[in-house]
Image: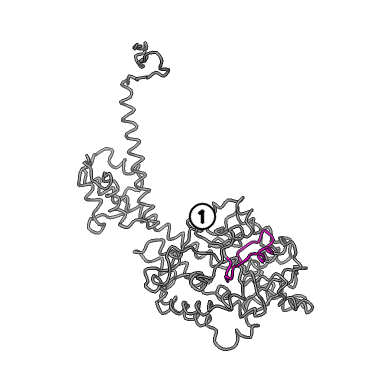
Amino acid sequence: MQLHISPSLRHVTVLPTKGVKEFIKFRIVSRRVSFRVVFYSLLLFTFLLRFVFLLTAVDTIDGESKCSGIGCFGRKIRPSILGRQLESTLPEVIYSVLEEPANETEIQVGPETPQTLEDLIAEFKGDRPDAKTFAVKLKAMINFLEQTTRTAKIQEYLYRHVASNSIPKQLHCLSLMLANEHSSNANARLQLPSPELVPALVDNSFFHFVLASDNVLAASVVASSLVQNSLHPEKFVLHIITDKKTYSQMQAWFSLHPLTPAIVEVKGLHHFDWFTKGKVPVLEAMEKDQKARSQFRGGSSAIVANQTEKPRIIAAKLQALSPKYNSLMNHIRIHLPELFPSLNKVVFLDDDIVVQTDLSPLWDIDMNGKVNGAVQTCRGEDKSVMFKHFKSYLNFSHPLIAKNFDPNECAWAYGMNIFDLEAWRRTNISQTYHHWLEQNLKSDLSLWQLGTLPPGLIAFHGHVHVIDSFWHMLGLGYQDNTSIADAASAGVVHFNGRAKPWLDIAFPQLRSLWTKYVNFSDTFIKRCHITAS
């Protein structure tokens, strides 16, 4: 074995015996390395300090921590391996100060509180503090960051709540213009469909779709996308159900914008005999639900003023105030067998979807005797949309829920559903739905808090046939990181979530999937300044 030392004294090369091709290099460290060690140590400390600040802020915002941010901060930086405390060179007083509850330590967050890491370093640059003073200042700074991030997050939730539940002035303009047109133009009051096409409304050889909406522009996009992507539009019948206040505008739009050769029916709830006679359980439940929510929730101002609840809880309570959760248009699907007594099968569409393919093959799916053909939402990487189970919607801490259902059972989605009405009529699904609505009201809304999906999961339990996810892609109203390529290749895309495509808060790159079915050269659209961006 030979030893060779380079002239610079920086490398020593050891040459092994022959037969070994590799050689090993040993570096002789120069004095400059010690400076690098100090430099990188300081850099690492600065990085770790910033990371801990960020970690504490995230815990505060998302509510993932089971303890207070400051206490957790103390425990997180206390060195440990596999739960065992190790010896540390940091003074114990630092851990003690950080782990003390905020109300037990006299820390005031004010103008003198450092607001950035640079402020903290600058304050101690000239005069090195003792460990306790340093810990108190550090704790005050983290308290400040927690308060700032919490306030900002709650403000964001409040602004989104207001933006998502307000009616844009453009849509209000469209509604007013169509109402005026309905009253002054006979062509805007046509019978839909025309008398010779009425028999098709109960003909099961046609493909029947149902859309319940009080949003004219949204309904027009669903209808246009459905018909334009159909291979046999002459076999498509679209039944549009709306409320009394929107009926004239909806009738005016589809009278003036026919989708020939498809057949469109526009009908108000007040036109259904069974709905205007006697008691309708869902209406009674909605009235009670509205009263209960007004007392149980309070207004949005009271919700955001709460200083003890975590931001995600406040967001859920704000969401519960959304009018759509107490809208008859949201509950009407549970009455499909009564609304269409002559039909055997329908596809129900929400008004925030866009159809991108021919939907007639849905009639070829064998439902195996099940009632509801739906896409499951428990298989996917996106935990906010496609990782949902019963426990995501139902309160399993309540014994009534816990003893009747499996928390890990896969959930499914509303938005694009195949309903076998013949099979439905042989079940007690509608009665089960109304029963659980009553149970939730009796429990002070403690079985679930939001929407029609939770009682739907219960009512259709055991009656769901899973269909391919191609037919229904969800989440385009929740986040802007949805792949455009994936969305464009889906059969139906669903803008479920707050960022509806007709709102200013819509995600621009996803909104184009919706706006392509809006005719921006239309007189009503132009006069109301409805634009693609």
Other residues around mark 1 within 10 Å, as few (<14) / some (14–19) / many (≥20):
few
Q: Is residue 85 toward the left or the right of residue 403 in the image?
A: left
- Percent across and percent down for residue 422 are 62, 76
Number of marks in the image? 1
Residue sitting nearer the eye, 455 or 48: 455
Q: Is residue 254 magenta?
A: no
Residue 223 visible in the snapshot? yes
Residue 398 location, quadrant = bottom left
Up/down of 51 relative to 347, above or below: above
Kindly identify which residue carries mark 1: 380
- Percent across and percent down for residue 29 are 32, 21
- Percent across and percent down for residue 143 are 32, 53
Q: Residue at x 39, y 52 (%)?
A: 58
Q: Which amino acid type corresponds to the residue marked 1 in the rendered image?
A: Gly
Label 1 element class: loop
Residue sitting nearer the eye, 124 or 93: 93
Magenta stretch? 351-373
Residue 519 location, quadrant = bottom right
Residue 322 visible in the snapshot? no
Q: Is residue 254 toward the left or the right of residue 14 in the image?
A: right
Q: Residue at x 52, y 72 (%)?
A: 460
Farthest residue toward the right? 196
